[in-house]
Image (cartoon, rainbow, N blue to C red):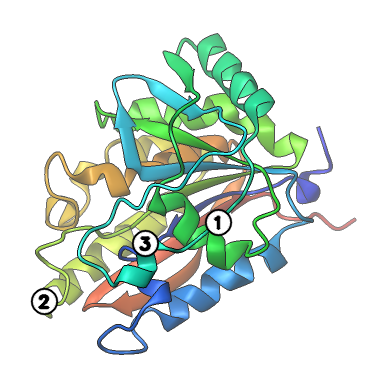
Amino acid sequence: MKNASSRMPSLFIPHGGGPCFFMDWNPIDAWDQMADFLRSVSSTLPRQPKAIVMVSAHWLGPKVMVTSAAHPELIYDYHGFPPHTYELTYPAPGAPALADHIVALLQAAHIDSATDPTRGFDHGMFIPLKLMFPQADIPVVQVSLLSSLDPAQHVAMGQALESLRDQDTLIVGSGMSFHNMRAYGNPQYGPVSDAFDAWLTEAVQANPSVRNQQLTHWTQAPHARDCHPPRAEEHLLPLMVAAGAGGQSLGRKVFSDRVMETTLSAFAFQEVASHA
């Protein structure tokens, strides 16, 4: 294992609303702080990753699927946005060998999985990565969520992938810590999102064994289902994968902002450098 402080972290990031960072919004500065945070992520890493594993809220299936094309196309899986947002590009290469390795790790952990040579990159991948790594020169593999929406299964997914962090691979869960489409913009949901975010932050920052237990039972959090309605929690589950991949690394909140009347946060799982 590499020196603890030099391991790649695992991250959970908010990816915004559709192509929000690349279009006009009302208010015009709604997504500015989140965009600035995403642009800053690379400067917090021990070095540039050799590869990125992206777990997006926008891909679910009965078993874990892994993109294995050498050059996946983009999937513009958002609707009703300005025409230019369907012309955004992010020509990052895929990593077929890494995809095979990921499937091997998952299967060794008894998690049903397979490669998908035809699936492209969805906007949960390319929208935030355009800000995080704009050169698009780092190979990326995207990993699906499970349509079971079982949080324990997603923690286990992350645990199976933890060793990738010792191979200079950055694991990123891409979702939203609050994702109730009917609540965005409603001031009544400000305190609701605050209460859930406070619980989530405490859970993430707990001892790793306690952390994973609490995240597995996230529906017991205050206002959990107001923030992630039943059968619509796919935007929270990438956090479970990131936490599982965090292993014994400490979790901490690394970003938070009030957007559309709700609190949205990002979390990182990373060893703290020790000093003799």
Q: Residues within 10 Å of mark 1 (few under 14, many from 20)?
A: many
Where, by quadrant of the figure, is residue 22 drawn?
Answer: bottom left
Does dot 1 land on a helix, a strand or a loop? Answer: loop
> x%, y% of residue 129?
54, 58
Q: Nearer the viewer, mark 2 or mark 1?
A: 1
> x%, y% of residue 118?
45, 28
| Picture residue at 46% right of the left edge, 63% below the top | 88
Q: Nearer the viewer, mark 3 or mark 1?
A: 3
Q: Residues within 10 Å of mark 3 (few under 14, many from 20)?
A: some
For this view, does 101 lie left or right of residue 86?
right
Q: Nearer the viewer, mark 3 or mark 2?
A: 3
Give the residue pinned by disc 3.
86
Q: Amino acid at mark 2?
A: Asn
Does dot 3 land on a helix, a strand or a loop? Answer: helix
Q: Residue furthest bottom?
A: 28
Give the residue pinned by disc 2.
186
Instruction: Give the quadrant of the C terminus.
Output: bottom right
| Picture residue at 32% right of the left edge, 48% below the top | 236
Give the residue pinned by disc 1.
90
Real-space Cα distance between discs 3 and 2?
Answer: 28 Å
Q: Amino acid at mark 1?
A: Tyr
Who is closer to the viewer here, 260 or 247?
260
Instruction: Give the quadrant of the N terminus.
Output: top right
